[in-house]
Amino acid sequence: MVEGHPKRFVAAAVAGVAYTQCYFLRKLVSSSTVYLRESAGFPETVIGAITSAFALAYGLSRVPGGLITDKLGARTTLAASLFISAALTIAVTCIANANIFYILWFLHGMCQASAWPACARLLKDLFPDRERAFWWAAVSTSQNVGAALTPILVAHIYTWFQERNAQFPLPIFPHAEADATWRFPFLVLALLCLPVVILAYALVPSYTVPREPAQNKATASKHKGADKPTPSWWNGISQLPSAIFLITIANMLIYAVRDIIGNWLLLIFHETRGFDPARGASVLALFEIGGITGGLLAGIASDKVFGGRRGPIFGICSFGLLLSCTAVSFAHSYAAICAVFFSLGLFLFGPQTLVGLFAMETAPPHLDSFAAGIVGLCAQLGGITAGYPVSLLKTACGWDCVLLAMPVIALLCFAASVPLWHVKPYGAQPKSSKRSQKKKKKKKVL
């Protein structure tokens, strides 16, 4: 087995910081729903269409994003993705037309689609098998850190600039409406990304895969399937195990629940519970803290308790997700809401953290990146559903129907996750065959 890269821990830390910055930008719209509606005058349908545009572009670009990573390398792809995302976010602060907002946020989604494939390639190449699941989960929690901090930062930046702008108007945005304060969080968080771009390009190693001895290359190619040509889309899909499709369905439903919470939680609590954005952000932060806890526990339990199997994590967490989604409609006090949303994050992000690794391990080795791309592509269908369609459901039936839809989605996710319980990594031998091989070796020695 190839040992880990000597700079793997520094590179993993930088990748985590960079992906946290990506999430700062990605969650700006969902963290600013109250301000976009009140300051910019955007109705829910416009906000939902913007979030769906991002999810659509992100999903369509996942597979090309992986190809770009393979072509340019993880370091260049990660730094370029973060830099262009920051530039597009700054451009959003200079427009006054919702249609241009759609276009820029669609391009933003295309650009961000390359960020996680770059991080995944780093983790897979830098870390040996015995360390990979834990560090995969650790770096994946950067999305929770970013999603937890973004609404808090947006609320504080908005309040600070609103107070200063009332005393000393800052006409730095051309063609802006009278209350342009919602634009300041976009500008500040985009500017914070620029030092991280330099950090990522400087500290991430350009060549991540440790070189193997020449005599092992032929043997490795036989076991890894590296000598097989890259198949076409249809041939690749036809060669994937059936478990990949169940993983895809479960992950798509997980993303639907996650993005309903991420996109609309602040607005739901503002209208149904009377929470101001800062208090709603504290609940959302607890949801993400639960996600960090769940992601780390899922990685440890998958490696240590279930012997490298990811399926049991999906089954256990999807059942917990069903119970938590059902409890949302019955939680009214602030303490109960905090407890419920912490449990939602705990059970939701466990499987979502490991889904890419699960897909790559379940697929044949020469199709591992392809399988991860397919799972990521279809996951964005859940994100698209959580945008504009949810805004239409709210307009027709109200927020109560949106909250009731969440346990229905979680139930379907549980149904898709149960058959994954006994799924093992591709090529893994059952214990009986391993024992028989050991006995044969002992006989040869005797």
Image (tube, rainbow, N blue to C red):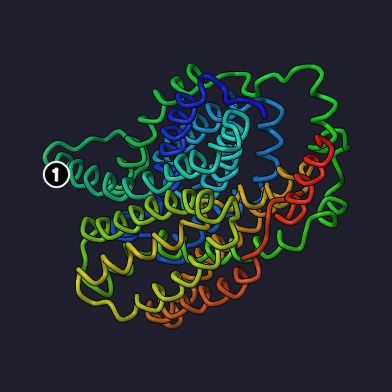
Residue 256 location (% of width, % of height): 52, 65
Q: Residue at x 79, y 23 (%)?
A: 216
Can you say whether 75 is above or below 391 in the image? above
The reply to whether residue 46 is in sight is no
Q: Amino acid at mark 1?
A: Glu
Quarter of the image with the N terminus is top right
- Which residue is situated farthest in the front direction here? 446
Residue lying at 56% horizontally and 54% vertically, measured from the top left: 55
Considering depth in this image, is 105 or 353 the residue closer to the camera? 353
Would residue 132 be found to the left or right of residue 243 on screen?
left
Residue drawn at point x = 53 percent, y = 60 percent: 313
Look at the numbered disc 1 and give the secondary structure of its residue: helix
Q: Which quadrant of the rendered structure holds the C terminus?
A: top right
Q: Residues within 10 Å of mark 1 (few under 14, many from 20)?
A: few
In the rendered image, residue 109, in percent from the top left (x then y), is placed at 55, 45
Residue 113 found in image quarter: top right
Q: Does 163 sit left or right of 96 as displayed?
A: left
Residue with the mark numbered 1: 163
**Image spot of residue 230 (x, y percent):** 85, 39
